[in-house]
């Protein structure tokens, strides 16, 4: 940060509507004259207290020294104090944040201007670069800026190979082992979270496919499709056009295989027949019309469960997940309001 000595003149009670740089700054070459009349009392509780506590000089001025930041950043900060909260998102506001974002963040933190701090935090976070991300991370910790902290950490985790080339990283490696440890821990946690998320997404995809397979099984056994079906009325034919179920052809092959497989009863069995068996069992567990159901073994599996009197916990969980996936999938196919669209995207891990 620049070490220039800047001073703000606060003129008490003078109805000056223009924030201005003084024409005759006297001993203070770089100063800003502000009027308390125009400044909202609540703009900065810290500055407000200081203005009333500081003694008034002979020329009716109070002088507050703001050190450690460039003069233009101080000027921009005072300008913000005179503006409405929406000023941060105006063109001039964005330009000021782009030029002096980190200084304005420090000032708004030190002088407790919450709305400006939030705007600067967002502005600095939106302009983060790998070369300075470690410095910004330190700044976020010093200024108690959690959003900026999170954004910095995410960028560090995303592009760690480039971050370790930066001066900021070399500095903390030599002088700040605690921050180095904190960053490495975050990267490890982020990696674990990513792996867990990928596992969950893979599981979600599997439940989705099983749900589709259940729907497809019902479709094959109820109305029939290209080569397999109950053959009631018109026989299934390819002339109906391609089936809308992605899994239909594979499932029909599996059903045909199971019907003729000679290994299904042999020791060790047949992996394809076992899979088909599990699909029939899964169908039976979620079937809501067992009396009229045409899917093979539906009633038999149901009777077996009733006779056993208990269902394996893992199986029960699988059934629950497949049913949920089916409900979410049918909701997704409907014309749906924005809120449901969001839930669906979150469920699919897209957002
Ligand atoms: Zn089909
Ligand atoms: Zn088989
Ligand atoms: Zn059934």
Image (tube, rainbow, N blue to C red):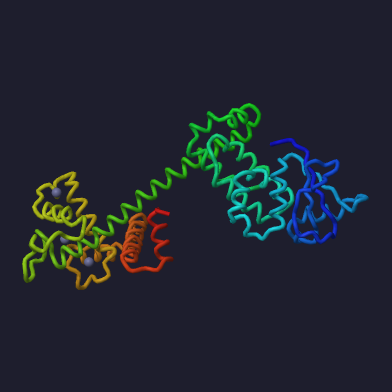
Q: Quadrant of the C terminus?
A: bottom left
The residue lying toward the viewer, choosing from 14 and 170, is 14
Count of marks placed on residues:
0
The residue lying toward the viewer, choosing from 329 and 256, is 329
Q: Can I make out residue 140 in this image?
A: no
Name the residue: 82% across, 49% down: 9
> In which image quadrant can residue 234 be found?
bottom left
Q: Quadrant of the N terminus?
A: top right
> In which image quadrant can residue 174 be found?
top right
Compared to residue 339, the image places residue 88 above or below, namely above
Q: Quadrant of ligand 1?
A: bottom left
| Residue 214: percent from left, percent from top | 24, 61
| Residue 286: percent from left, percent from top | 29, 64
Q: Furthest-bottom residue in view?
A: 291
Q: Can I make out residue 63 in this image?
A: yes
| Residue 339: percent from left, percent from top | 43, 66
Name the residue: 61% across, 40% down: 136
| Residue 194: percent from left, percent from top | 44, 44
Q: Furthest-right residue in view?
A: 58
Q: Is residue 71 left or right of residue 292?
A: right
Name the residue: 9% across, 48% down: 262
């Amino acid at each position: 940060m620049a070490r220039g000595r800047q001073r703000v003149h606060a003129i008490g009670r003078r109805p000056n509507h223009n924030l201005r740089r003084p024409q005759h700054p006297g001993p203070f070459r770089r100063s800003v004259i502000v009027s308390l009349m125009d400044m909202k009392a609540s703009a900065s509780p810290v500055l407000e207290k200081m203005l009333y506590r500081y003694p008034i000089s002979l020329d009716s001025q109070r002088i507050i020294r703001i050190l450690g930041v460039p003069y233009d950043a101080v000027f921009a900060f005072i300008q913000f104090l005179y503006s409405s909260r929406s000023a941060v998102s105006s063109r001039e506001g964005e330009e000021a944040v782009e030029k002096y974002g980190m200084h304005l963040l420090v000032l708004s933190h030190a002088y407790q201007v919450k709305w400006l701090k939030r705007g600067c935090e967002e502005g600095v976070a939106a302009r983060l670069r790998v070369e300075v991300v470690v410095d910004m991370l330190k700044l976020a910790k010093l200024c108690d800026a959690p959003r900026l902290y999170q954004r910095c950490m995410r960028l560090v985790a995303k592009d760690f190979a480039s971050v370790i080339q930066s001066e900021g990283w070399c500095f903390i490696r030599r002088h700040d082992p605690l921050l180095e440890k904190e960053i490495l821990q975050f990267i490890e946690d982020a990696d674990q979270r990513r792996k867990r998320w990928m596992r969950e997404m893979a599981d979600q995809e599997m439940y989705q496919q099983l749900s589709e397979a259940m729907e497809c099984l019902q479709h094959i056994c109820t109305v029939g499709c290209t080569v397999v079906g109950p053959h009631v009325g018109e026989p299934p034919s390819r002339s109906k056009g391609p089936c809308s179920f992605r899994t239909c052809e594979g499932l029909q092959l599996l059903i045909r295989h199971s019907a003729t497989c000679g290994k299904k009863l042999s020791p060790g069995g047949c992996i394809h027949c076992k899979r088909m068996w599990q699909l029939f069992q899964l169908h039976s567990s979620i079937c809501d019309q067992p009396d009229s159901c045409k899917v093979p073994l539906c009633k038999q599996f149901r009777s077996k469960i009733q006779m056993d009197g208990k269902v394996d916990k893992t199986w029960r969980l699988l059934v629950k997940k497949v049913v949920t996936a089916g409900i979410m999938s049918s909701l997704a196919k409907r014309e749906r309001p924005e809120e449901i669209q969001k839930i669906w995207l979150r469920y699919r891990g897209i957002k």
